Image (spheres, grey):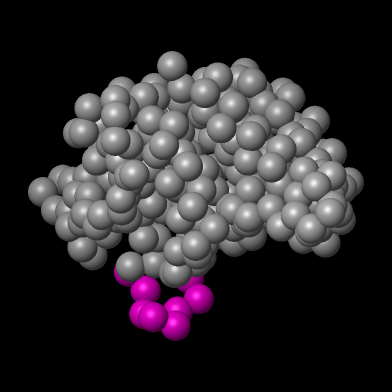
């Protein structure tokens, strides 16, 4: 069974100095027991790794991926409210990308997975970096930017440089259905494969375990979460080759 370990990734140099206040990015990673197929960078907006998220990372590793999550808030105080956008995000992603490549992962076999605001960040990475594939879950900031350093997703989507999958809940107030439809149209104008899948209600969170009540094996909420998880795995299987 794959196990987690801690490591650091060196920030790229800018001139003669490190690209940031520290020379490395803290990482939590997990490697497969067998041959490595590629790598998945997990961007997350929480300082704490929830058990469902860790379970998802384990499942990805069991499929042969090196899964690594940079600690995006290491620059900030414990109770800070910093966003995960801007130059710091891209610097931390680049360091994590380089860490994977240094472990033998081919550049075009690196995927990115993000949830909530970090799902927004994952899509923005896909508009500025030529990675292998990207998945965003519940990415906000579709029409109105989340911060001054993050363009609205409908503006960024035509510039996608990597195949992108977006998963949304139709009743999620932070991502209105009409906005998601605008994003669907905008992403279709990109030069790469782009797919948005919307689930009824809020059952789209692949980082949550499907709770199947006794006697309700056909529960639609659990089925939607399982389908969302399957689509994530299938997206990386299809595009990271």
Residue drawn at point x = 69 percent, y = 42 percent:
226
Measured as percent of width and height from the top left, residue 120 is found at 60, 49
Measured as percent of width and height from the top left, residue 13 is found at 18, 46
What segment carries the magenta color? Answer: 75-82
Q: Is residue 108 left or right of residue 238?
A: left
**Up-down relation of residue 82 to residue 149 (above or below):** below
Q: Is residue 100 magenta?
A: no
Which quadrant holds residue 117?
Answer: bottom right
Closest to the observer, 213 or 77: 213
- The outermost residue toward the left is 16
- The outermost residue toward the bottom is 79
Residue drawn at point x = 52 percent, y = 43 percent:
113
Q: Is residue 38 left or right of residue 193?
A: left
Which quadrant holds residue 98?
Answer: top left
Closest to the observer, 129 or 107: 107
Measured as percent of width and height from the top left, residue 14 is found at 20, 47
Q: Is residue 77 magenta?
A: yes
Task: Please state the total of marks drawn on the protein image.
Answer: 0
Chief secondary structure of the magenta span? loop
On-image quarter of the N terminus: top left
Closest to the observer, 129 or 59: 59
Residue drawn at point x = 72 percent, y = 23 percent:
189
Query: In the rendered image, is residue 30 in sight?
Result: yes
**Up-down relation of residue 93 to residue 234 (above or below):** below
On-image quarter of the C terminus: top left
Measured as percent of width and height from the top left, residue 218 is found at 84, 44
Which quadrant holds residue 123?
Answer: top right
Q: Is residue 60 left or right of residue 23?
A: right
Residue drawn at point x = 46 percent, y = 22 percent:
240
Query: In the rendered image, is residue 120 in sight?
Result: no
């Amino acid at each position: 069974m794959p196990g987690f370990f801690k490591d650091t990734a060196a920030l790229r140099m800018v001139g003669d100095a490190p690209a940031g206040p520290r020379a490395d990015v803290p990482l939590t990673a997990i490697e497969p027991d067998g041959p490595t197929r590629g790598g998945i960078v997990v961007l997350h907006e929480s300082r704490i790794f929830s058990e469902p998220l860790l379970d998802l990372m384990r499942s990805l590793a069991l499929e042969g991926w090196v899964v690594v999550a940079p600690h995006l808030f290491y620059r900030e105080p414990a109770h800070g409210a910093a966003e995960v956008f801007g130059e710091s995000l891209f610097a931390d992603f680049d360091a994590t990308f380089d860490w994977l490549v240094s472990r033998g992962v081919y550049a075009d076999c690196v995927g990115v997975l993000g949830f909530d605001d970090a799902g927004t960040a994952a899509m923005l990475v896909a508009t500025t970096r030529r990675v292998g594939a990207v998945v965003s879950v519940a990415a906000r900031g579709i029409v109105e930017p989340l911060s001054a350093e993050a363009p609205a997703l409908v503006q960024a989507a035509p510039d996608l440089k990597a195949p992108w999958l977006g998963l949304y809940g139709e009743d999620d107030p932070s991502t209105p259905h009409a906005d998601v439809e605008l994003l669907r149209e905008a992403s279709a104008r990109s030069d790469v494969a782009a797919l948005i899948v919307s689930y009824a209600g809020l059952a789209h969170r692949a980082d949550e375990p499907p709770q199947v009540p006794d006697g309700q094996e056909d529960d639609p909420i659990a089925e939607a979460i399982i389908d969302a998880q399957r689509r994530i795995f299938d997206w990386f299987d299809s595009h990271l080759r």
